[in-house]
Amino acid sequence: MEQYLDAVEPLTPADRTIAEEWAAWMRTQWAEHGKSSMTQQRSLMNEVRAFLKKQLGKDHIALETLDFSTEEWAISNNAIAHKVAQRNENQVVLSPETVNQIVTRATNLLSSRNWYDIAAGLAVLSGRRVTEVLKTADLELASDYSVWFTGALKRRGEETVLRYEIPTLCRAEYVLSAITKLRSIKPVGELSVGEINQFSRAVASACNEHFADIVPSVGGRDTLYTHLFRGIYLTISVYFYCPPTVDEQEFRAEIKGAFVGRGELNSTLRRTIASDRHYKNYIIQNSDGAMRKGVRLDWNGVQILKAFQKLDQPEPGRSPVDSVQNYLPQLDQPKSTEAIPMMEKPSTKRPELHADDLTKLQSLMAQRGVTGSYAEIFSAAIQLLQSQQQVESKPSQEFESIRWFQTEIDALRGKIIQLESQSSQLDAAAIQTLQIENEQLKIQLQQTQARLEGIQQLLGNGATVPIPILAEGRSLHRQGCTLPTHTPPERQHPIGLRRQRQN
C-alpha cells in the first residue's frame, strides 16, 4: 500500500472521478491476483481502508470511493453469518477431563525454554495474542487467578487506555513470570506490530504440536492457535469463573474486552455481545450432559471479577428471586378473577402421614430385606440414609485431598518458572562477562605474539637490545649493548642450541 499512497494522498473531493477510477483499478488488481470473490476481497478491503484511514484521515475521498456498496456488504456479511451459524449449530463438546488436560499442558509449557512454546501456553491461559504477550500487553496482578490488562491490540490509538480484569486459567503469578521470561528469551525491541505478527506462525505450529490430539478441529480457515486464544479460553473461563447469577454472554464480553466507548471500565463503558457468536465453537458438558459454570469459585484464592462483584448479592443457597422480593414494597395487587387451582387435599385427618406413603415405604424396605413394625421400618430407613451420607462424604474428602495436591503442584510449578526465569537472566549475564574476558585475552595474546616476533627478529639479526640487569631487587636496562655474533655454548639461547643439534 505504501507505493499507492502518493497517488491518492493529494486527491480532494473535487477529484472524485480520479478517486473512483483508482478504486476500480485497485479491485481489478485484487481479482487478477486470484481474489475475485466477495469473501476473498472482504479482508483486503478492511485492511486497505484501515491503512488509508490511519494515513490520510477518516474524511479522505479515497475512503469514500474504495468501499463495497450496501448490497455487496450485505452479501459478504450474510455469507459469514451463514458459516458462523453452521458452526454454532454443531458445537464441539469438551469434557471436564479434556479441559483439565488442556490447562495442564498449557501450564507445563510455561516451563519450556522455547519462546514459541511459552507463547502457546500463554495463549491458552490468558487469551492474549502473540503480539500482546511479546510487546503490547501490560499485566498487573489483580488476584490469585486474575490480572489487570492493558495493551489490547485492537484498541491501539485510543486517547484513553482501556484497562480491564481478565481471569487466568492457572495462578496469575505463573502468567506474569512466564511473560517476563518470554520477553527475555525473545526480545522484540523496536519491531513494529506487523513485524511481530510474523512470529504467529511458529506459535501456531507449537499449538498444533501440543494440543491437536486433545482439541477437536471445527474446520474452516482458522488455525488451532486462533481457537485456543479466543474460543477455548473464553469457554473454559466461563466454566471456571463465571458466577451462577451472571449471564454467560456478559461474562465473555467483559473478559474479551468487547466494549462500546472509550476509557476506563466504568458506568459509561458498555459491553457488546455482537461478536461473541464467532467464538462459540466449543461447549463443556459433564458425562450426564449438564453444562456448569463457576466450578472454581470455591477454590482458595479465587475471587469473582471486580466487574461482577455486587454488595447486595444473595446469600449462598438462597433464591435470587426471593431476595429481590424481600426489598419490594407491599403494593396492593388487583385480584384476579381467574380461579387458582388448588392441590387436592388428602382424605385423612392426619395429612402428615398417609396410608399410601406407609405402604410404599414398607414395600421399598421389604425389597432391602427389612420388615417389621412401622417403628422398626422407620428406624431402618433412617440408618440407611445416614450410611449413604457417610459414603457420599468420602469422595468429598478424597476430592479435598486431590485439590490439596493440585495446590502444592501449582506452587512448585511457580517456583520452577521463577527459578528458570532467574537462571536465564544469570546465564545471559555470565555469557556476556565471558565474551568480554575472551576479547581481552585475544588482545593480550596478540600483544604477546607481537613481542615474541620482535624478540626473534632481534635475536636473529644481532640487533642492539636493552639487556636487563638485576640490582637491589629492581630491573634495570643498559642501553646500547650489541649482542655478540658468537656466543659460547653454555650461554646460547635454548632455541639456538636445539637448531645446532638438528643440523
Image: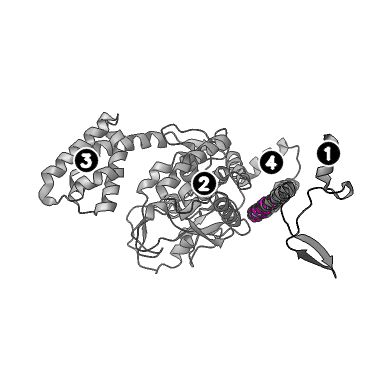
Farthest residue in the right direction? 490
Q: Nearer the viewer, mark 1 or mark 2?
A: 1
Up-down relation of residue 213 to residue 253 (above or below): above
Q: Earlier in the sequence, mark 1 or mark 2?
A: 2
Q: CA distance from mark 1 to mark 2?
A: 76 Å
The magenta region covers 428-446
**Residue at left offset 41%, top offset 35%:** 87
Distance between the alpha carbons at the discs numbered 1 and 3: 96 Å
What's the residue type where badge 2 is placed?
Answer: Ala
Instruction: State yes or no: discs 2 and 3 in contact (Cβ < 8 Å).
Output: no
Q: Which residue is mark 4?
A: 362
Q: Nearer the viewer, mark 3 or mark 4?
A: 3
What is the spatial separation of the Cα atoms under label 4 and label 2, in whole angstroms? 60 Å
Look at the image and name its color scheme: one colour
Q: Main secondary structure of the magenta part?
A: helix
Q: Which residue is mark 3?
A: 68
Q: Closer to the camera: disc 1 or disc 3?
A: 1
Q: Are marks 1 and 3 in contact (CB under 8 Å)?
A: no
Task: State whether residue 57 is above or below residue 503.
Answer: below
Viewer-proximal residue among 144 and 372: 144
Q: Quadrant of the N terminus?
A: top left
Alpha carbons under labels 3 and 4: distance apart = 77 Å
Amino acid type, label 4:
Gln
The disc, 4 or 1, on the residue closer to the chain's N-terminal end is 4
Q: Report whether 148 appears left or right of 488.
A: left
| Residue annotated with mark 1 | 500
Viewer-nearest residue: 27 or 219 = 27
Binning the other alpha carbons within 10 Å of mark 3 as few (below 14), some (14 to 19) or many (20 upward) gives some
Q: Marks 4 and 1: which is nearer the front? A: 1
Near mark 4 (Cα within 10 A), the count class, few <14, some 14-19 or many ≥20, is some
In this figure, which residue is indicated by the disc labeled 2?
123
